[in-house]
Image (tube, helix red, strand yellow):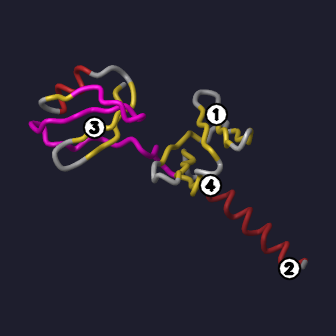
Amino acid sequence: MKRTLISMLTLLAVTAASADNYSYLAFQTADGSTRSIGVESLEMTFSDGKLIASNGTESLEISVADLTRMFFSSEATAIKDISLDADSPVKAYTVEGVCVGSYDNMASASANMGKGVYIVKGEKTTHKITIR
């Protein structure tokens, strides 16, 4: 029993030490989506069956029943640089799935959308992007 406890404490210490190299904590849900939050000043609480993660500047609220995985990451997840063909038509959606417009190309979409996070669907690819 004592040996098992020491092994578990050692594993916990190694895991905590390796987490220092990562800037984000990512959460993956049952639908496959992944969201992340910066780890600096991160606090996590549980309330009404939800995990609430907050670092003072942003917060995430995720149902514990939908949470499938948590992991550390060196970069923010779910937001990537876009690589859509410059001349292909695209449709833009909010993260809730509401279509906000159809555009002739990505440049036109970027110029006409407000700040926020969007799902942009091209002819062959789909990307989650952010407009700042």
Q: Which residue is mark 2?
A: 3
Mark positioned earlier in the residue sequence (3 or 1): 1
Decide: is 38 above or below 107: below
How far across and how far down the image is residue 64, in percent? 65, 49
Per the model, the C-alpha gap separating discs 1 and 2 is 36 Å
Residue 15: assigned label: none
Per the model, the C-alpha gap separating discs 3 and 4 is 32 Å
- Residue drawn where x is 16% and y is 45% of the image: 123
**What amino acid is labelled 4 in the image?**
Ala
For the residues carrying marks 4 and 1, which lies nearer the camera in this image?
A: 1
Q: Is residue 77 left or right of residue 69?
A: left
Give the magenta-colored segment's residue range. Answer: 73-101
**What amino acid is labelled 2 in the image?**
Arg
Decide: is 31 above or below 5: above
Circle 1 packing at 10 Å, graded few (<14), some (14-19), many (20+), is: some
Q: Which residue is mark 4?
A: 19
**Element on which disc 1 rests:** loop
Circle 4 packing at 10 Å, graded few (<14), some (14-19), many (20+), is: some
How far across and how far down the image is residue 9, in percent? 80, 67
Q: Residue furthest front?
A: 98
Q: Which residue is mark 3?
A: 120
Per the model, the C-alpha gap separating discs 2 and 3 is 53 Å
Mark positioned earlier in the residue sequence (4 or 1): 4
Q: Quadrant of residue 60?
A: top right
